[in-house]
Every structure is written in C-alpha cells, then in structure tokens.
Image (cartoon, rainbow, N blue to C red):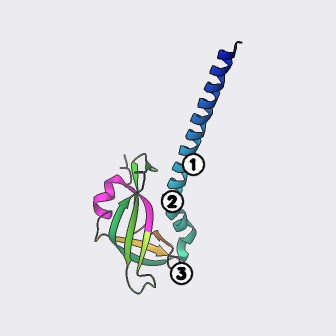
C-alpha cells in the first residue's frame, strides 16, 4: 500500500467517524426531546387514583422545538405540544406548563386557547400534573369492526 492509499484510508476513517458521531448526536437529541413529551403520561400512570382531579384552561399552545411527532398506540400521528394552562381554583398553582403528545385529529378541539383539559394533580407537588385521559382523551380510538 503506497502513501496515497494510506492517506485516503485515513481520510475515509475520519469522515466515517464524524458521520457516526453526528448520527449518535441526532439519536441522543431526539430521544431527549421525546422523553420531555412522554413523561406526562408516565406521571399520570404513577399518580393513578392518588391524583387530585382538577382542570386547566389552555392559554397558550406551542409545538415542540423540533416539530416532534410520533406514532400513537393505534398507528395514528401524535404531535408534541407544550400547553400553558390556567388552573381552575382552588388550585394552589395559578398556571402550569404541560408537555404532552396529542392525536393530530384532536388538535382543533384541545390545542386552542380556551379549551378545557381535565387533569390529575400531584397532591404533594401541585406543579406536577397529568392529563386525566378518562375525561380528556388524547387519542382517537379505532372503530370496532
């Protein structure tokens, strides 16, 4: 192997290493952002029946920084949103920011200022809320055939 061939292989190795590192960075960033918007569902599962039923009114809606979407449990498209909610009295928190995934078919009903979202609130930490999916479903169920 002559010197030019060695140089070409070295350049190729460096380029492939850079591409690999860029790919890993993309996966890490995507996973981190996804976790922000799926954490709300895990909080709801943890709260279970211990959560205090309350509700909030949407005052502001923002998409995720990278326009994150993912497949739902029925194959539909879920959109990552950040909702600022004005909490209903007598909540100790005047407002909360809720990051969650909503079925794109429900966006016109839920992702608009003035929409009411039913919530479960952590009694030990009122800033921690989750959507009460029994009263405010975030996914459209498939038709029964």
Name the residue: 41% across, 87% down.
90
Q: CA distance from mark 1 to mark 2?
A: 13 Å
Tell which of 35 and 104 is nearer to you: 35
Q: CA distance from mark 2 to mark 3?
A: 22 Å
Q: Are marks 2 and 3 in contact (CB under 8 Å)?
A: no
Which numbered mark, 3 or 1, is in the foreground of this view? 1
Which numbered mark, 2 or 3, is in the foreground of this view? 2
Whichever of labels 2 and 3 marks the residue nearer the N terminus, that label is 2
Q: Quadrant of the N terminus?
A: top right
Task: Give the residues drawn in magenta, as a range.
Answer: 98-112
**Badge 3: how crowded within 10 Å, few (<14), some, or many (20+)?**
some
Image spot of residue 128 (x, y percent): 51, 73
Residue at mark 1: 28
Image spot of residue 19 (x, y percent): 57, 34
Q: Is residue 22 left or right of residue 143?
A: right
Q: Is residue 7 left or right of residue 73?
A: right
- The numbered mark at residue 36 is 2
Residue at mark 3: 123
Q: Secondary structure at mark 3?
A: loop
Magenta stretch: includes residue 109: yes
């Amino acid at each position: 192997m002559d010197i030019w061939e060695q140089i070409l292989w070295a350049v190729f190795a460096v380029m492939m290493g850079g591409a690999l590192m860029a790919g890993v960075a993309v996966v890490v960033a995507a996973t981190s952002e996804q976790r922000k918007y799926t954490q709300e569902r895990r909080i709801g599962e943890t709260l279970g029946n211990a959560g205090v039923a309350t509700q909030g009114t949407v005052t502001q809606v923002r998409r995720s920084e990278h326009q994150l979407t993912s497949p739902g449990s029925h194959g539909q498209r879920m959109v990552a949103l950040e909702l600022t909610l004005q909490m209903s009295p007598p909540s100790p928190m005047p407002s909360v920011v809720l990051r969650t995934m909503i079925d794109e078919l429900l966006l016109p009903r839920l992702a608009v200022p003035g929409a009411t979202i039913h919530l479960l609130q952590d009694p030990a930490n009122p800033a921690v809320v989750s959507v009460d999916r029994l009263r405010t479903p975030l996914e459209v169920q498939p038709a029964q055939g």
